[in-house]
Amino acid sequence: MNAHSTGSVMKRRELLAWLGFAACGMPRPSWAGGAPALMLANVYRPGVPLADYWLSEKYDGLRGFWDGQRLITRGGEVIVAPAWFTAGWPTQPMDGELWMGRGLFEEALSTVRQQTPDDDKWRRIRFMVFDLPAHPGPFTERIQTCQQLVRQIDQPWVQAVRQERVASHADLMARLDRMVKAGGEGLMLHRGDSLYRAVRSDDLLKVKTHEDAEARVLQHLPGQGRHAGRMGALLVEAADGVRVRLGTGFTDAQREHPPAVGALVTYRFRGLNESGVPRFASFVRVLDERLR
């Protein structure tokens, strides 16, 4: 198939996708400028009917959205990738993760945020495609279309996320344990009969050994003992007003130069106490709000 034919096929598919959304009465997704309307995940809990879901790895990268012309962040910022990275990509939108490998989030973040792209570093980035927002069919159909689309793109740095079935909660927990021991962040569950909806729902679930949350830095609390003379903890506040003290998870360099007051940070925790405050809260990283 020549380039002209491929382009025509992609345009026809995109048109059919738009018609499909209109035919089923769904609002047309918005990604023409500004923050894209993305599907968001809830947290997995035992009792979910796992037979209804597909399972994949949860990649610890940066959410990347291809709107058919530009690669943008969850917050709507244009990602300045090398021209070759997106050359020949289709007009059909793709939802995915810009990923450098397990345990390499900070290096991936540093690479993606640069306004002058570093070719050598970008050649280590992969775009892991996990969904097609404009496709009108259920996720099980979208998996097949996504795999076909990635084969047509035919670039080693563009990969379709592997999807498989999971038999039971015990099987899921065993897989999660193996994933974490291998350096992975966790797993994702995606309901097979779900349409792409730009809301947070049980159609998409994250499976992790801990929970994550975001909060604003309110105050640097002084350290004691070996941390005397530098930051001992951060007092942070979540969007719902809950305040949390983060005293672990920091490097010595971060204690010497802590996240600025007002910065948005991610922390992890294990459940809530009776007052609704996160238990065993630990600092993870500062968020670059332009790349959310």
Image (spheres, rainbow, N blue to C red):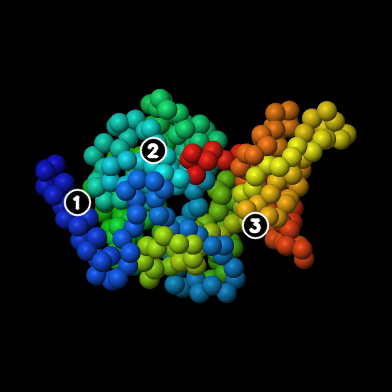
Residue 199, percent from left and from top = 45, 62
**Relative to residue 106, is residue 171 depicted above or below?**
below
The kind of secondary structure element at disc 2 is loop
Q: Residues within 10 Å of mark 1 (few under 14, many from 20)?
A: some
Q: Amino acid at mark 1?
A: Met
Q: Is residue 212 left or right of residue 56?
A: right
User: Residue, x 38% and y 32% (percent of image)?
Assistant: 80
Q: Is residue 148 left or right of residue 291?
A: left
**Disc 1/disc 3 C-alpha distance (Å):** 43 Å
Q: Amino acid at mark 2?
A: Val
Q: What residue is disc 2 on?
A: 78
Q: Is residue 4 left or right of residue 108?
A: left
Q: Residues within 10 Å of mark 2 (few under 14, many from 20)?
A: many
The kind of secondary structure element at disc 1 is helix
**Disc 2/disc 1 C-alpha distance (Å):** 23 Å
Q: What residue is disc 3 on?
A: 240
Q: Amino acid at mark 3?
A: Asp
Residue 173, percent from left and from top = 59, 63
Q: Of the residues tagged 2 and 3, which is closer to the observer? A: 3
N-term mark: 2 or 3: 2
